[in-house]
Amino acid sequence: MQTDHQTTHDALEDPRNRDILIYVNGELKPRDEAKVSVYDSGFLLGDGMWEGLRLYDGVWAFFDEHMDRFFDSCKAVSLDVGLDRAGIFEALEMTRRANGMQTDVHCRLMLTRGVKVRPFQHPSLSRSGPTLVIILEHSKPVDRMAGPGIQLATVPQVRGLPMSQDPKYNSHSKLNCVIACLQAEQAGADEALMLDPHGFVNTTNACNFFIVRRGEVWTSTGDYCMNGVTRGKVIELCRRDGIPVFEKNFSLYETYGAEEAFLTGTFGAQTPVASIDGKPVGDGSRPVTRRIRELYKAEVAAYVAARR
């Protein structure tokens, strides 16, 4: 299997990450000693929720929006967080301070239903409370705007209906997306473009997906994808700046004819797409994507300045 693909989570190597301290249920553990039980619900069943956050100049960007999604998801699956928002914030800060981190930091906040008394499915077997883990890494994304962008391949794996497993959950159960990622890799691409159950273009296996057609920005309806915080910010910024933006159904036919395409996510912000199913996207100039990226950087800077 090929291993030289790009990903939307490629970061510059940082040796400091070998010695990070990781938060595990209120304690800080060296990376090699940070462990959870093999009886943990997350390990046994993927029963948990997670959130990705970015740290800019000592400020957790768009913290409230991330916590809205996190707490809504936990409530929807009857998962007791064990802390309120202030408690989560303090746990993040405790971990940040212990690692001496200030900026260009990515956080993986993970909560599971906790350790089970027996290795079976029923939630009632998790009786000792939730497991909370926070991993912070020095993490500066590779600048994709300077290069050709990433390659996508449309895959047979789709994002499912809400009554099977609602794609809006940022759950530990990511096998659906992992399968899509493998299919894309086997097709020689960097990431998978996934359709919704009706055949409309939806999302990738790791990020939200946008196209630009004749100056208009299009993204999916949001019914079958993770409603990402960065996705929402891009839509908001387009509306504020007068860039026509639409959440709508569209097909591969319209996608192949786009002048630009990009992905959004907390880690990479906006990542340009070079090709889809071997078809080049536009001429590489990406004026709308570049404008949105400028608007997003300014939004992050304003958010950070208001909270320092």
Image (cartoon, rainbow, N blue to C red):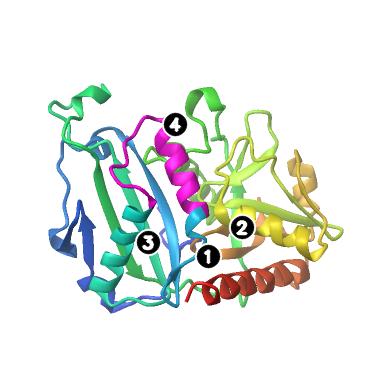
Q: Is residue 67 magenta?
A: yes
Image-based side of 7 in relation to 137, left or right: right
| Residue type, label 1 | Gly
- Compare marks 4 and 2 and give the one earlier in the sequence: 4
Element assignment for label 3: strand
Q: Nearer the viewer, residue 281 or 173?
A: 173
| Residue most extreme to the right | 214
Q: Is residue 279 left or right of residue 257?
A: left
Q: Nearer the viewer, mark 1 or mark 3?
A: 3
Q: Are marks 1 and 4 in contact (CB under 8 Å)?
A: no
Name the image quarter holding residue 10. bottom left
Return the x and y of residue 259 as percentages of the image width and height: 79, 60
User: Looking at numbered disc 4 in the image, what kind of residue is underneath it?
Assistant: Ala
Within 10 Å of disc 2 (Cα), the crowding (few <14, some 14-19, many 20+) is many
Q: The magenta stretch spans which residues? A: 65-85
Residue placed under numbered mark 4 in the picture: 76
Give the amino acid at mark 3. Answer: Cys
Disc 4 and disc 2 in contact, CB within 8 angstroms:
no
Q: Distance of mark 1 from mark 4, alpha carbons? A: 28 Å
Which of the 4 quarters of the picture holds residue 198? top right
SS for dot 4 = helix
Residue 167 in the figure: left or right of residue 39: right
Relative vertical location of residue 301 with respect to residue 278 in this rendering, above or below: below
At mark 1, the secondary structure is loop
Q: Residue at x 13, y 26 (%)?
A: 118
Labelled disc at residue 268: 1
- For disc 1, the neighbor class at 10 Å (few under 14, some 14 to 19, many from 20) is many
Pick whichever of labels 4 and 3 is earlier in the sequence: 4
Answer yes or no: do the residues labelled 1 and 2 have beta carbons within 8 Å?
Answer: yes
| Most frequent secondary structure within the magenta stretch | helix
